[in-house]
């Protein structure tokens, strides 16, 4: 009996030892088989005395090094992060400064390009003098290459060639010889410049103030005004040649011509086209001659212009230059003389250009 009792006690003890983990696990949920309790410190706030601030227990922790808690490594990682952030900040700041300098360099480069472009434009943009000279050369080419008839009869083309010849004339140079018949010059009108800069035609002063009225103004409708203008103009020319001008006479004559101009304009539809143009041209020249009579300083110039002197183009150019004269429009019947004079001046200009071109061409080397 005693042996049997001891045997039973041994079996029960072994059974209790085997059941102890299960009993402990049932009583403590934080107990792990084959290990110890998860927590080693008691925290009354945490149920069952668990302190979550303490490290947890993991079996075979050596097999999972990534999950191992290292308080020293965590502190070093935080410090490294701070150092890395500081380094990144310094690096970003330097990159920002570099970008700012690049922007400044780009602005300077842009300003330099703008300056270079401006200098290029200035170097290749013709000046006002060059533009004027270019326009003058175009006018010369137009005057040389068969200009319109009205530009020749008005004296515009001949004046263009006159100015061009004056600019090309060199002191001491031998001018080309282009003759002009005397009967041509007798039909050419010139115009001096008054002290106010107003051109004054001498076309009406060549015959002592005697006027030759156009066909449209020869009707009885204009008889009274023709008589008044003939008398006043002849008297004004006589006084002008004597150096004594009656201002009241000139003023009265100017008012009469202004009224006549307005009257003729109002009859534009009643007078034939060619006759109307001839009448307007006559009145314009007459008003220009009256303008010349207002300036006593023109007496010598007008007397010089009454008869152009010169046997060739060079002498005519010299005479016109010394007396400050320009060619005035042709009167009716004088257009042929103007065409002949234009041809003479055109030939003279071409010869001058050829001479200048030859003088600029270097001689061939032997």
Image (cartoon, rainbow, N blue to C red):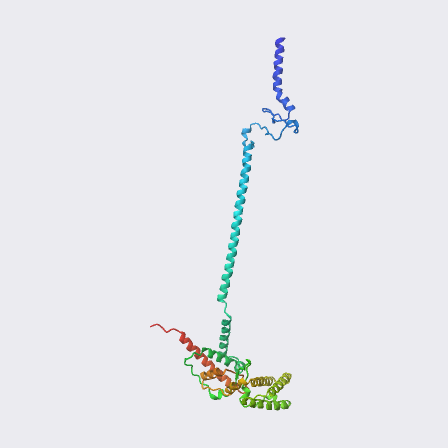
Q: Residue at x 49, y 64 (%)?
A: 119
Q: Residue furthest front?
A: 244
The quarter of the picture where the C terminus appears is: bottom left
Q: Position of residue 217 (x, y in %)?
A: 61, 88
Q: Is residue 313 left or right of residue 52?
A: left
Q: Position of residue 161 (x, y in %)?
A: 48, 79
- 164 is higher (above) or lower (below) than 37: below
- 132 is higher (above) or lower (below) than 59: below
Snapshot quadrant of residue 11: top right
Q: Position of residue 302 (x, y in %)?
A: 52, 86
Snapshot quadrant of residue 259: bottom right
Q: Position of residue 269 (x, y in %)?
A: 64, 83
Q: Residue at x 60, y 91 (%)?
A: 231
Which is nearer the eye, 365 or 289? 289
- Label count reads 0
Q: Residue furthest left?
A: 366
């Amino acid at each position: 009996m005693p042996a049997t009792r001891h045997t039973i006690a041994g079996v029960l003890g072994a059974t209790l030892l085997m059941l102890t983990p299960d009993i402990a696990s049932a009583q403590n949920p934080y107990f792990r088989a084959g290990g110890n309790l998860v927590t080693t410190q008691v925290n009354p706030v945490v149920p069952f005395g668990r302190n979550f601030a303490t490290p947890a227990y993991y079996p075979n922790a050596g097999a999972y090094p990534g999950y191992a808690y290292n308080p020293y490594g965590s502190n070093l990682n935080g410090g490294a992060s701070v150092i890395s952030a500081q380094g990144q900040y310094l690096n970003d700041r330097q990159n920002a400064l570099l970008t700012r300098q690049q922007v400044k360099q780009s602005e300077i480069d842009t300003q330099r390009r703008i300056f270079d472009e401006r200098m290029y434009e200035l170097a290749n943009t013709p000046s006002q003098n060059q533009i004027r000279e270019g326009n003058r050369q175009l006018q010369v080419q137009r005057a040389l290459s068969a200009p319109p008839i009205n530009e020749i009869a008005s004296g515009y083309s001949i004046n263009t060639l006159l100015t061009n010849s004056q600019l090309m004339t060199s002191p001491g140079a031998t001018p080309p010889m282009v003759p002009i018949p005397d009967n041509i010059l007798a039909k050419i009108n010139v115009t001096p410049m008054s002290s106010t800069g107003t051109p004054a035609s001498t076309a009406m002063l060549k015959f002592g103030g005697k006027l030759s009225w156009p066909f449209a103004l020869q009707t009885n409708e204009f008889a009274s005004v023709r008589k008044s203008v003939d008398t006043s103009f002849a008297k004004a020319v006589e006084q002008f040649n004597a150096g004594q001008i009656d201002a009241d006479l000139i003023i009265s004559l100017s008012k009469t011509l202004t009224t006549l101009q307005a009257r003729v304009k109002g009859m534009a539809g009643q007078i034939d086209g060619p006759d109307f143009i001839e009448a307007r041209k006559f009145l314009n020249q007459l008003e220009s001659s009256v303008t010349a009579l207002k300036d006593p300083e023109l007496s010598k110039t007008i007397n010089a212009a009454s008869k152009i002197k010169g046997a060739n183009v060079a002498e005519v150019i010299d005479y016109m230059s010394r007396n400050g004269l320009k060619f005035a429009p042709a009167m009716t019947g004088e257009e042929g003389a103007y065409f002949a004079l234009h041809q003479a001046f055109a030939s003279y200009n071409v010869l001058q250009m050829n001479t200048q071109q030859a003088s600029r061409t270097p001689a061939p080397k032997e």
